[in-house]
């Protein structure tokens, strides 16, 4: 190989620089999102695990039931009735969008378009 | 074998005719006559459903123009009530305007009626127009994403999540009751009066009157009907319920609909 004395160290330096973020964060999980749960309420409409993985599916189902089938019967959990609605249901307990929704959405880099139309509590626009 | 060009062309021509004609001839013979079903128009369907369904709920509205003529400013009150409740933006110009319910002169509301020697009373009266929630809605047929649909109770509703802003429904609606959000409506909604219980729309979707489905679900009357108070200017109810107030009104008064000849079968009636 011609110029091996330049190419091989060059490659080593290049690989080291490119993989630097991996070396640096080795064994460190990074900042884990901690969505703030509403105070004084212990139970959501579904289990925490289900809500974590499938809240978007639940919202879609609620939307179709309320809008298309006209079925707006509130969801009852432990005698408490929750409206099938993002603004008038979910956000009544989860009052802080920044500390609840955005916490994970920013971490996972998902950009749901809910807020193009739906109001955030205490919103000023 | 030696075939002349002339002979070849003759045979080719005859076999083409036989090939094209034979299946048609066989069909005729086997079915015993030409097929009489026409697949072309969907207008037949429109005509067939011209009469209201005799069963089930069909929500409708009667607008008593005599009351609106006697109470100037009442129509404006209805419009304001509706547009406030539904967070309808006010862009301040005609081009971008979003309207759910608004006033138009007689000749614009009832284009099919003759204007020759028009009743003098009609000259300075304006009619409230809104989505007719047709029994046979052309907008629903035109929508490629099922964003607009007819509910079981007759309300033609919209799911703004699904609207892609193609505006086929606007072209299909013969009443011009749909508006398109050319701009982001949020900054043009009055911050003091806006309704926090109802969402806004976003840029690029079509919107229209929804007969206040959300209010009906809570047992309330539509916002415009509520704004009329007990003047009797607007009556809302089930057109298929023979005991409802709206049916009594329809029984006892001569009413007109907008463009009935189109076969859309509107659910909004006017007492002129």
Image: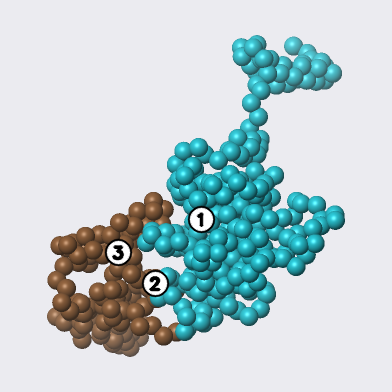
Whichever of callouts 2 and 1 sits on the residue coming sooner in the sequence is 2
Q: What residue sits 76% from the left and 16% below the top?
A: B14
Foreground residue, A28 or A37?
A37
Q: Which mark is residue B9?
A: none
| Label 2 sits on residue | B197
Residue B129 visible in rendering? yes
| Label 1 sits on residue | B236
Q: How far across and down, in percent of the image, does residue B109 sit?
A: 70, 59
Provide the secondary structure element on which disc 1 rests. Answer: strand
Q: How far across and down, in percent of the image, does residue A103 sit?
A: 27, 79
Rendered cyan, the chain in question is B
Q: Hey, which quadrant is residue A62 in on the image?
A: bottom left
Rendered brown, the chain in question is A
Q: How far across and down, in percent of the image, does residue B222 sit?
A: 48, 62
| Label 3 sits on residue | A83
From the viewer's perspective, tell me whether residue B7 is left or right of residue A54. Answer: right
Cα–Cα gap, marks 2 and 1: 23 Å
Q: What residue sits 47% from the left and 44% below the top?
A: B243
Question: Circle 3: is it few (<14), some (14-19), or many (20+) Cα within 10 Å?
Answer: some
Cα–Cα gap, marks 2 and 3: 12 Å
Residue B149 visible in rendering? no
Q: How far across and down, in percent of the image, does residue B269 sit?
A: 61, 52
């Amino acid at each position: 190989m011609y110029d091996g004395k330049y190419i091989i160290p060059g490659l080593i330096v290049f690989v080291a620089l490119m993989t630097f973020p991996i070396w640096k964060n080795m064994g460190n999980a990074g900042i884990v999102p901690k969505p703030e749960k509403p105070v004084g309420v212990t139970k959501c409409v579904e289990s925490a695990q289900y809500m974590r993985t499938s809240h978007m599916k639940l919202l879609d189902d609620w939307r179709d039931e309320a809008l298309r089938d006209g079925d707006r019967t509130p969801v009852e959990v432990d005698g408490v009735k929750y409206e099938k609605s993002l603004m008038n249901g979910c956000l009544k307990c989860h009052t802080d969008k920044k500390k609840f929704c955005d916490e994970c959405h920013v971490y996972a880099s998902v950009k749901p378009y809910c807020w193009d139309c739906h109001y955030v509590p205490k919103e000023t626009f | 074998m030696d075939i002349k060009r002339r002979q070849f062309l003759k045979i080719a021509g005859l076999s083409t005719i036989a090939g094209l004609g034979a299946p048609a001839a066989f069909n005729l013979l086997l079915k015993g006559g030409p097929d009489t079903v026409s697949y072309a128009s969907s207008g037949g369907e429109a005509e067939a459903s011209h009469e209201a369904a005799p069963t089930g709920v069909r929500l409708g509205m009667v607008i008593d123009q005599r009351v609106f003529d006697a109470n100037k400013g009442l129509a404006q009150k209805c419009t304001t009530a509706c547009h406030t409740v539904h967070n309808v933006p006010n862009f301040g110009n005609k081009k971008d305007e979003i309207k759910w319910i608004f006033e138009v002169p007689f000749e614009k509301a009832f284009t099919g009626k003759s204007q020759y020697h028009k009743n003098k009373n009609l000259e300075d009266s304006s009619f409230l127009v809104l989505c007719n929630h047709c029994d046979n809605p052309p907008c629903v047929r035109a929508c490629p994403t099922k964003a607009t649909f007819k509910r079981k109770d007759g309300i033609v509703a919209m799911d703004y999540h699904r609207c892609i802003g193609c505006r086929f429904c606007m072209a299909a609606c013969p009443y011009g009751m749909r508006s398109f959000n050319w701009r982001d409506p949020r900054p043009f909604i009055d911050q003091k009066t806006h309704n926090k219980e109802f969402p806004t729309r976003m840029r690029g979707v079509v919107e229209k009157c929804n007969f206040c489905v959300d209010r009906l679900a809570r047992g309330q009357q539509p916002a415009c009907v509520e704004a009329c108070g007990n003047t009797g200017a607007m009556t809302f109810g089930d057109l298929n319920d023979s005991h409802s107030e709206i049916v009594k009104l329809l029984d006892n008064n001569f009413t007109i609909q907008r463009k009935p000849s189109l076969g859309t079968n509107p659910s909004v009636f006017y007492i002129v």
